[in-house]
Image: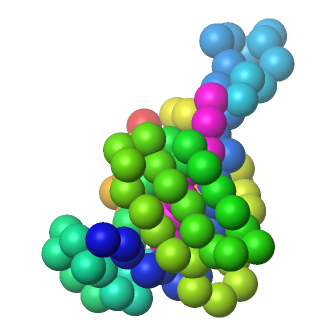
Amino acid sequence: MVTTVYDWVIVSIYDRYNSHDENTFVGKVLFGYVLDDQTCRYAIHDYVTTSRIEKSDLSRGIIETHSRSTYILQGKGTENCIEFKDFELLRMGYSPQQISKFNDANISVLH
């Protein structure tokens, strides 16, 4: 059973312990919009933010996650990154681009 997503983004997540530390890579997740869902977990055109990506084959358009879910990537996607402090915004359905705009405008939606 798979979920097919479009307008997808592979999101790298970084964290730092304090303002003096370098960014530390935490992991990658998939963010996208549901085109088809054989698992019956999502509504069509709803957003999905996955658990950590364990395997990816971008040439075939397949992602497998830590929770053992499989996603088929429809169309061309992008890659982006966010800070760990913004991860809940991603899980709430805000795209990485929206999160970036919030941060640029210094808008505090969640934190």
Q: Main secondary structure of the magenta part?
A: strand
Q: Position of residue 54 (x, y in %)?
A: 56, 43
Residue beneath the point at 57% across and 86% down: 74
Looking at the image, is 32 positioned above or below residue 30? Answer: below
Residue 93 pos. (x, y %): 39, 64
| Residue 55 spot, x, y in % from top left | 60, 49
As rendered, which of 32 and 65 lies closer to the eye? 65
Magenta stretch: includes residue 46: no
Asked whether residue 33 appears in the rendered view, the answer is yes
Residue 8 seen in the figure: no
Q: Is residue 72 above or below residue 111?
A: below
**Which x, y percent locates residue 46?**
32, 79
Q: Furthest residue to the left? A: 40
Residue drawn at the location 72% of the way across and 58% of the way down: 80
In front here: 61 or 111?
61
**Above/below status of 101 relative to 51:** below
Q: Which residue occupies the foreground of this view, 97 or 25? A: 25
Residue in the picture at 68% in, 75% down: 60
Between residues 11 and 2, which one lies in front from this camera angle? 2
Q: Residue at x 56, y 34 (%)?
A: 84
Q: Judge from the rendering whether residue 4 lies leftward or rightward of residue 95; answer left or right.
A: left
Residue 58, placed above or below residue 52: below
Picture quarter with the N terminus: bottom left
Asked which quadrant contains residue 22, the reply is top right
The range drawn in magenta is 26-32
Q: Give the quadrant of residue 79.
A: bottom right
